Amino acid sequence: MKSARALLFTVPLLVVALVAGSFTLALSSAGPSAPDNVLADALKLAGRQSGYHLMADVQQTVIPRALPGNAGKGDETTSVRVVGDLANGQGAGANERRARLQFFAGAEQPVELILTADKAFIGYGQRWQQVDAPPGGVAPGGDYLGYLVAATDIAEGEPVVTQAGAFRRYTFTFDGQRYAEYQRDEAYRMLASQLPQGMQLELHPVLKATTGSGELWVDSDGLPRREVLNLAMPGVTAGYDAQMQLTVDFSGYGDSLPAIALPQPTGPDGAMVLPAADPVAAATTRSRATLDGTMQPAVVAQIGEALANAARPLRRPISLALAMLPALALLALLFGKQRRSFYVAVVSALILVMVSQPL
């Protein structure tokens, strides 16, 4: 079951890139061309708001393939919840847009991520560390629109009526072939100066084979309220397929959300901590998740294997860096005094994977 357990960490990391991307839209003012459709229009409009709250639930199932080595193995399902806010900063950063995300994956405390236009911080158990920003900054232009390239057959479905009101509902099909081509083309663009002359990047087989569907609920103001993705990913590893269901709820547009402070080196021995006045538990109290499973001592080895698996489908440097930050946070903090050297080693390995191997 070792491979299956590794996938329980791997598959959510692939989707976390989409969740984190939902925030990068408001941290960036420009981006690559995107499909001219209601999906892009709604997400762009959200990015122009003063702030909002986001809650995402990811459920994934890894399915053993019909192979002799998988005899007796069954499906395994796990869940991840991501909550966060986009708001202005504190003090000197009062006019700066910032995002704060919390990742609940069976641990008592969440792994946290704070993003600004050019900085990234990871935290766990009130311990924080600044990490190197991904290439081009942590707010890549238009990265949140990447998956829309794969949205085909967009159509308006039956409206949805909830206690919060009535919403227009748009459905679409997820085309893995188109998404794989987009990722390859983006890799060419971003790595143009690093690739040897004549080197060809292949379409990633997992992305190419991914199929699925999705929908976006839009309110009367044209703002997104719920985003749904259902994906099937055959052959995630040689022995397993995977299925993912992602639901993202947007709320609090224009609300007076608490300002987001940045960790400062004011703790013992210069440790990075958040200012005492920062509402660190606000999102945790608001959305503490009831999730299956508990964090076991073997989590370090499992996340380590997950990093290797996740590096293959997510070659795009920005998406990979965003997806890896929660796992790197756990790994770095669990290694105590050695966390700096360990973090550097892991990041160096990821960079080598991204620039030296074909997609």
Image (tube, grey):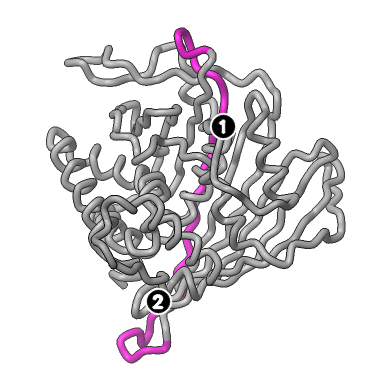
Which residue is most to the front?
Answer: 197
> Magenta segment: does it hold 74?
yes
Which residue is most to the bottom?
Answer: 68
Give the residue number, with chain letter if any, for mark 2. Answer: 240
- From mark 1 to mark 2, how far is it between C-alphas? 40 Å
Q: Residue at x 44, y 31 (%)?
A: 115
Give the residue number, with chain letter if any, for mark 1. Answer: 29
Taking the image as shown, residue 190 lies to the left or right of residue 220, namely left
Precedes in sequence: disc 1 or disc 2: 1
Taking the image as shown, residue 354 lies to the left or right of residue 294, namely left
Q: Which residue is drawn at 32% across and 16% down?
A: 264
Task: Count numbered badges in the picture.
Answer: 2
Label 2: few (<14), some or many (≥20) within 10 Å? many
Query: Which of the 4 image quarters holds residue 283?
Result: top right
**Measured from the top left, where is residue 157 in percent x and y?**
83, 61
Q: Which amino acid does label 2 sit on?
A: Tyr
Residue range in magenta is: 66-94
Q: Which residue is drawn at 62% across and 59% down?
A: 229
Q: Which residue is drawn at 34% across and 26% down?
A: 126
Q: Nearer the viewer, residue 215 or 128?
A: 215
User: Which quadrant would the C terminus be assigned to in this image?
Assistant: bottom left
